[in-house]
Amino acid sequence: MAVKHWKMLIGGQEVDAPGAEPIPVENPANGQVIATVPAGDASHVDAAVAAAHKAQREWGARTPTERAIVLEKFARLLRERLPEFIDCEVEQIGRPIREMRAQVSRLPEWYEYFSAVARTHEGRVHPFGGPYVNYTRRQPLGVVGLITPWNHPMLILTKKLAPALAAGNAVVVKPSELAPITPLMLADVFREAGLPEGVYNVITGYGAAAGKALSEHPDIQKIDVTGGTETGRHIGAAAGRNLAGFAAELGGKASVLVFDDTDIDRAVSGALFASFIAAGQTCVQGARLLVQESIYDQVVSRLVERTRNLRLGDPADINTEIGPVVCQRQLDRVMDYINIGRSEGATVAVGGERPGGALADGYFLQPTVFTNVKLGMRVEQEEIFGPVVCAMPFRDEAHAIELANATNFGLAGSVWTRDIARAHRVAHSLEMGIVWINDHHRIDPSSPWGGFKESGVGKENGIVTYEAYTRTQSVVVNLSDEPFDWFDENKAVEKRYS
Ligand code: NAD
């Protein structure tokens, strides 16, 4: 059966790249090509940026309330069409349908939240002094480039898109080459909601071509990227050369800290949830499991048991708990790390192999727990981005904090304890942008999300993100009717300059 060839979206038009080999999009559960998309290049980025600038003038001139009305309608329409988006996410990235139902169903909330922020956001009056009134107003930035990864194709796009549009910007999106379909599908919903053509543009293509051209484009006012830390460095350098704004959500190596006053079953369920949803392919994956030594053996043996029983299978089946990783390259990368861990002296307590049988055609891999892990091993320091967790014991609170902070990443972590003072004390000592207490992975459009250290720059979600998609104009008004002439030669010098 012929697979569908999608086209890019530039200024409301569907545009192909006939000169370039189309990019195949695979279903990771069986390796079959489900669609193709154009390999866009710098010429397409140029056209999209130009179309976006034209459209932004009208969109940005609307009042925040007028923009909110469009985005609220978009949220309603998206909610009606969720099943087709959920099914496509499952097909293009292999995430189990139970995860994608939970995640994608919440996305209309982002548009509702940022519509509400736009409707209610107030300017400020500043204590300027003298006979002056000074107020500031927020304006859109103009055209922003959004570069997104494959692991949560719609969620991550939504976290950037909702505040960018609510604030009056036009966007050029460069989705991951592995998962470009749902961003293209959104065009239809935006059209129906009444978003002016050219405000939402999508250029499909590879990072080294389309992504690079977008990040280097001189007419982009801001680049917002989610991806690996090295990708973030390249894009940040390009943005810096153009003096464009820059926000980046990058890699992670999250720790799960389990203290000995915790209910063990609850902590084990939490660790499983932290480590293995999305087959471990989330930036906040609980990749380092730090357990107080008095309960270490108990927690690890229960975790190993539960991990062994996780149901791998067809992601479209509601009973499946763990799907494949996204592609052959990712599978090879994770298997390489498992071998590196073994050669470093860590022990595979469970997993570490590829399942055979009906799953042999997909990029499946057994969820894996390493024990006998030493601080500084590559498996416990580097981002693997797969279903692999490294367990390590800690002596006391200070040791737990020391281990948790002993990484170049600083995105997120979770603290499992029933001691309320310790929960907050430890959270405040962690060099991480997000800390959950007795939970993991939780997200809300109102709650700032973003990493410290090599995990990123800037935030997603919350009022800070709306503001980061605006520029501030300061208006200074002289209220005095007194004549003023700095160069009045008739006035004595002492009077003029006193
Ligand atoms: P990636 O860095 O390979 O690609 C991300 C995007 O950048 C893709 O669209 C890609 O085409 C583009 N790109 C790649 N090189 C580029 C370049 N030189 N110039 C411009 N664009 C370029 O990342 P990925 O494999 O798609 O996603 C996984 C990574 O994303 C992991 O490191 C993960 O931790 C990170 N991530 C972070 C968060 C967060 O919130 N901090 C969330 C999800 C994923």
Image: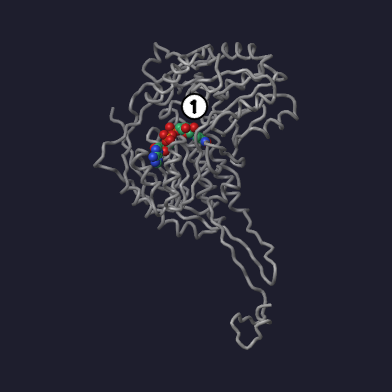
Residue positioned most to the left? 19
14 vs 406: above or below: below
Q: Residue furthest front?
A: 494
Quadrant position of the C terminus in the picture: bottom right
Q: Is residue 184 visible?
A: no
Colour mode? one colour
Could you say which is closer to the camera, residue 421 or residue 171? 421
Residue 4 placement: quadrant:
top left
Instruction: Give the position of the N terminus as an image quadrant.
Output: top left
> Can residue 172 be seen in the rendering of this structure?
yes
Q: Nearer the viewer, residue 398 or 302?
A: 398
Residue picked out by circle 1: 382
> Residue sitting at 51 percent across and 49 percent down?
164
Going by the numbered disc 1, the residue's amino acid type is: Glu
Kindly indicate the quadrant of the structure image that contains residue 30: top left
Look at 54% across and 19% down and name the residue there. 390
Query: Where on the image, by quarter, is ligand 1?
Result: top left
Q: Nearer the viewer, residue 313 or 260?
A: 260
Q: Count every numbered label the image shows and give the total.
A: 1
Q: Position of residue 283 (x, y in %)?
A: 52, 31
Q: Is residue 52 above or below residue 403?
A: below
Report x, y in % for residue 207.
37, 39
Residue occupying image coordinates x 36% and y 28%: 26
Residue 425 placement, left or right of 246: right
Q: Is mark 1 within 8 Å of ligand 1?
A: no
Residue 358 location in percent, x, y?
A: 39, 13
* Secondary element at tag 1: loop
Query: In the image, is 352 to the left or to the right of 407?
Result: left
Seen at 66% across and 74% down, the residue is: 479
